[in-house]
Image (spheres, grey):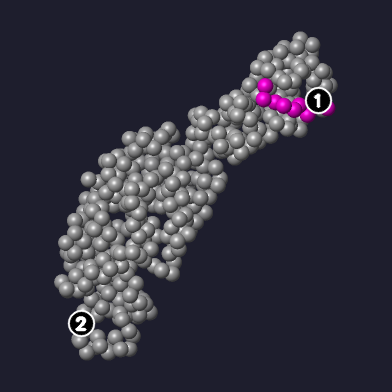
Amino acid sequence: MTVTRFAPSPTGYLHVGNLRTALFNYLIARKNGGTFVLRLDDTDPERSRPEYADAIKQDLEWLGLDWDRVETQSSRLDRYAEAADKLREINRFYEAWETPVELDLKRKKQLNMGKPPVYDRAALELSAAEKEALRAERGSGVWRFKLDHARINWADGIMGEISIDAASVSDPVLIRGDGQVLYTIASVVDDTDMGITHVVRGSDHVTNTATQIQIIEALGGAVPNFAHHSLLTGPQGEALSKRLGTLALRDLRENGVEPLALLSHMARIGSSDPIELRGSMEELVEGFDLSRFGTAPTKFDVDDLYPLTAKHLHAQEVSTVAADLDALGVPTAQQEAFWTVARENITTRHDIAQWWTLCHDGAEPDIDPDDAEFVAEALTLLPPMPFTETSWSDWTSAVKEKSGRKGRGLFMPLRKALTGMQHGPDMGQLMPLLQVVRAKS
Ligand code: GLU
């Protein structure tokens, strides 16, 4: 049984970087008929907020990434305390009292001596009396997991064989001086208790994974399959970390990006497969293959989402946008015909309104001075309203006969007079929807 999880911290809104992690884990679960757990990593009481947890759920719902279960770390603190006790029992957990400033000094010294800045385990040398003195002076220390200085190996689902020397990594702090349990241990306990079989996350977690594998083993759990996807960069390869705040999923939604366009894009960038618009979640699941992804940083350009959004909308039946058309006041009887005309001329749903305004209110005519006389005469030949499917061809044939104009010289001034634009829907289809011709008055 495959069990995956998406484990955001509810300390902000989800962005495209998080989405990649969520989507991969979701697709793996669905492809294998497994379970997808939404886990809220909310052990930091200062930064975690219920409104962010709600926003995360809303964003996932918008995308159709449905979860089978929600878990919250803040309700599992007892389990983390038990795990901490176990680590103490087996002598893999020790208290240390260095302040951040002292640690920083140690790191600088090591770097000056050309050594890697790894915690020197000075706390392990403390006598019972020294510990007592430090506790009296500084209160509770942090709790560090004592790594076993061997190589840590795993077959990464994306990066391939990984081997990390535990001696090159500092013993990770799992509990802070104020008692706050940190993500590193909470995550391990959860992954074990919840039977997580596959963990996909960003490559910024590779070192975490190494230490977590040892913690899982120390606690007697089963090590899941790990995979680390590359991080996103901007279109020029620039770091995206600072801009991710502006790439929040809710902003993309506001800007009219369609869920399937976004998901189709995110499920393929960074893989050796071409980006293809998928028509449904089932198709996305079907076409997903983690082994196709590479380790190079993945370029992300928000502008790429709009052509896909347009393509998605062009393929939609009117039922998909019925609510939008109702909101604009498009009468039900006209919705089908209007959508046929509008859908090919929009990039996002926000563009639908402009075409309904054109139909409903007419457009400010755009008439070149050179064409003024021609257009004025043409308007005298305009068939009576309401227009029908043949109004445009009837009209242009009559104007052609009278004026002798043809081709672009005939059609363009008439289109511009009626719509105020050079481009737009097929005029034959648009005419029956046009309720006002402002150029006439
Ligand atoms: N809360 C962690 C994060 O957002 C989860 C990482 C993980 O997937 O284990 O980075």
User: Residue, x 33% and y 48% (percent of image)?
Assistant: 68
Q: Nearer the viewer, residue 117 or 358?
A: 358
Q: Nearer the viewer, residue 148 or 75?
A: 75
Residue 91 shows in this picture: yes
* Mark 2 and mark 1: Cα distance apart in space: 94 Å
Give the side of residue 42 with respect to residue 436, left or right. left
> The C terminus lies in which quarter of the figure?
top right
Classify 46 as above or below 435: below
Residue 434 shown in magenta: yes
Where residue 231 appears, x then y in whole percent? 39, 52
Q: Quadrant of residue 76?
A: bottom left
Mark 1 or mark 2, which is nearer the start of the sequence? 2
Q: Quadrant of residue 74?
A: bottom left
User: Residue, x 41% and y 34% (percent of image)?
Assistant: 280
Q: Is mark 2 within 8 Å of ligand 1?
A: no
Where residue 151 appears, x then y in whole percent? 18, 61
> The N terminus lies in which quarter of the figure?
top left
Q: Which residue is mark 1?
A: 440
Mark carried by residue 265: none
User: Residue, x 20% and y 87% (percent of image)?
Assistant: 128
Q: Residues within 10 Å of mark 2 (few under 14, many from 20)?
A: few
Where residue 107 appears, x then y in whole percent? 33, 74
Give the side of residue 15 with respect to residue 403, left or right. left
Q: Which residues fall within the magenta stretch?
A: 432-441
Name the kind of residue labelled 2 in the image.
Glu
Classify 402 as above or below 16: above
Q: Secondary structure at mark 2?
A: helix
Mark carried by residue 125: 2
